[in-house]
Image (cartoon, coloured by chain):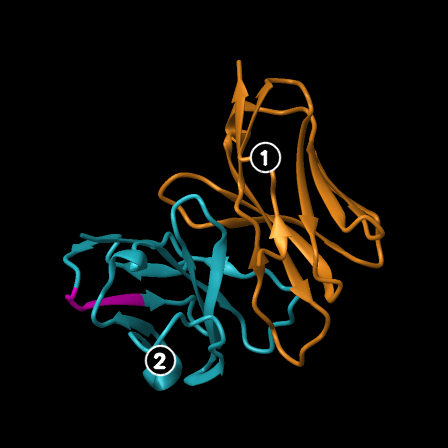
Amino acid sequence: EAGVTQFPSHSVIEKGQTVTLRCDPISGHDNLYWYRRVMGKEIKFLLHFVKESKQDESGMPNNRFLAERTGGTYSTLKVQPAELEDSGVYFCASLPRGGKRTDTQYFGPGTRLTVL
Amino acid sequence: DQQVKQNSPSLSVQEGRISILNCDYTNSMFDYFLWYKKYPAEGPTFLISISSIKDKNEDGRFTVFLNKSAKHLSLHIVPSQPGDSAVYFCAASPKYTGTASKLTFGTGTRLQVTL
């Protein structure tokens, strides 16, 4: 079974540009999470999808960030326009349908975003 | 306001010795705690967890201890092996919210196991 995959692995853009990150969860996993780690800091929650619905988007920093999960499969996270403070590693995680909070979230390898 | 704190950014331990990684939390609503391990260029992988109804959970070389009154947990690795060298994240989950909820992570502790 394939794990959580993320694309690209690394993205370098200039301030003001747009970047779209993609996450493919484990097949059949209805729960999908986005997290971000700014260098040296904690891994911070951004938002949680259940299928195509946003269950919790309390961690989204501002309206420059837009997450979508059309069809309840893969998800995209768009940053537009990117700012310097958006640099960090963006992780995606997934959990099976009906997953409880005591179940393990499976993380992807992350996308390292560098905004110059 | 950081609700899960790992105050030691790094730790170096000799192979065969015990590694002890610490974590403190401030939110009384947390009642499920996890440790994740992360290698460079990889995502975090689940290591071990503990529910607040327990004070200890053991899995092979890994044991997690929970002190609820002190809002403190620790991860013990015995014996430490070079392959354990990684960044360890403490994470917490709040009491039942109706669905599989988000995790709140600490800043991580980089463990280096030397030969």
Using the image, tell me which numbered label, if any, was put on residue A29: none
Q: State the residue at coordinates (57%, 50%).
A: B106
Q: Position of residue A74 (x, y in %)?
A: 34, 74
Residue bearing mark 2:
A69
Give left or right: position of B90 versus B71: left
Q: What are the residue bounds of the magenta stretch? A: A16-22
Whether residue A29 is visible to the viewer of this picture, yes or no, is: no
How far across and down, in percent of the image, does residue B44 sit? 48, 49
Q: Is residue A27 visible?
A: yes
Task: Name the outermost residue toward the front.
Answer: B1
Specify the quadrant of the image occupied by residue A80.
bottom left
Q: Quadrant of the N terminus of chain B?
A: bottom right
- A112 relative to A72 in the view: left or right: left
Q: Both on one chain, marks 1 and 2?
A: no
Give the chain coloured orange.
B
Asked if B15 appears above or below A101 in the picture, the reply is: above
- Seen at 77% across and 51% down, the residue is B71
Residue B37 part of the magenta segment: no
| Chain identifier of the residue bearing label 2 in the image | A
Q: Which chain is cyan?
A: A
| Location of mark 1 (residue) | B8
Identify the residue at the far top of this view: B115
Q: Amino acid at mark 1?
A: Ser
